Image (cartoon, grey):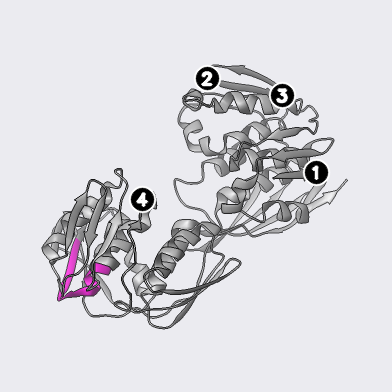
Amino acid sequence: MEQTVSPARKIIGELIVPGELPSAEQALLLAVMAEGESHIRNAPPAIGRLANLLSGLGARIARKGRELTIQGSGLRGFTPAGSILDLSDMGDIVPPLLALLVGQTFTSRVKLSAEQEHCRQLFTLLAPMSAQVGQEMEDTFAVGGAKQLVGVAHEPVDVEPAVKLALLIAGLYAEGTTSLRESAGNRNRMERFLRERQVTVERRRQEDSQYLVSIAGGQTFQTCDVDIAGDLRLAYPLMVAALARRGSDLQVKRVALRSGQRGFLDLLRQIGAEIAIEDLGNDAVDLAVSYSELIPTRVAGQRMEKVIEQLPLLAVLATQTSGEFVIRDVAHLRQGEFDYVAHLFELLKQIEARVGEYPEGIVVKGGLPLRGARIDAVDDPGLAMAFAVAGLLAESEMVIAGCECLDSVYPDFFATLHSLREKR
């Protein structure tokens, strides 16, 4: 599939990007355990994998665009799946999902990735609760089938967030009270997602300055409609375009801005980007982006680690600065059969960027015009979106092949790009 992008005079309008996948998955899992109808708005396309898996367990989920309508099954209104549930590489939603399965009276067979160590930790913590977990093969487990879980006081302190949420969910299936301990400085507040659904979770300070988090079994989830904050990473491309075109005014509505996940935004502001941030609460913000005179810099070391996911966009951004922009410490992307850095370098050469290549990275001389070309994004979302931005900033049309990857990430990316682009 090819997409054609024409030069833009400026970028004007409002942008709403698909929501963060982890937040959407968590909201969906809690919704299917509620009793009644819930709605999740601005869900990303990748939510489909979890939705299909839960539907296989009898959950009733309807999807229309970015909105999900869920008819909750209650804690025990699920049915056995007809095959092994493949949970490999599904991230932090797996422990809470396993807690749901452990609480059922039927047995489910699940496949896990070798790197999912937090699941093994969860199994160890669930064992004293009379949870039924048996390993069948190296990566396959049988879970669930116990008549009744039993509440216990867990000894480990400060388990990771996904495991904490899983233990609290397991506590709802248990007879009695389930508790766990946290240090005073712990900022893990997963219990708030249960409280939003009318589940009582206590958190009390202890004499040793730790906190005891406890939940009584037998409680039920109430419905809760959720608006998922957008994935900031998907807003970056059009933000860069707006920063580089005089007269631009882009409003990015309700995106998630979390500590430790804002490296590229911080870099943009460090090099002169005018980006106003309005705090909406619960880690959600509105951003206002306008044209800015961007200054070149050197991105390396820890600074590079924070923005490595945005490497192609960073290279395109560098062409819009006023001098030499150095990008280094990306040599690990040259390893294997495909040299990612070399391919990026060749694409930049094709659009006539002034760029030099060296083993550790590339150096870009900004401030010079770009030319449109036919480039191959090799089914990489970062390359596809970055060179779509280059097409907006070039002096002639850009034709981008290998864009199918965006169907599962941001399917209406090009439609949104064209709607915000004011023609020359």
Task: Residue at 19% x, 53% y: name it.
Answer: 135
In the rendered structure, which amino acid carries the disc numbered 2? Glu
Disc on the earlier residue, 1 or 3: 1
Q: Nearer the viewer, mark 3 or mark 2?
A: 3
Q: Which residues are magenta?
A: 169-180
Q: Label 3: how many residues lie within 10 Å, few (<14), some (14-19) or many (20+)?
A: some
Q: Label 2: how many residues lie within 10 Å, few (<14), some (14-19) or many (20+)?
A: some
In the rendered structure, which amino acid carries the disc numbered 3? Lys
Residue 246 tag number: 1
Task: Residue at 22% x, 74% y: name it.
Answer: 105
In the rendered structure, which amino acid carries the disc numbered 4? Ser
Question: Is label 2 in contact with label 1 (beta carbons under 8 Å)?
Answer: no
Q: Residue under circle 3?
A: 349
Disc on the earlier residue, 4 or 2: 4
Q: Label 4: how many residues lie within 10 Å, few (<14), some (14-19) or many (20+)?
A: some
Q: Residue under circle 2?
A: 360
User: Where is residue 170 shown, x and y percent of the image?
Assistant: 24, 68
Residue 196 tag number: none
Q: Nearer the viewer, mark 3 or mark 4?
A: 4
Residue 168 in sight in this render: no
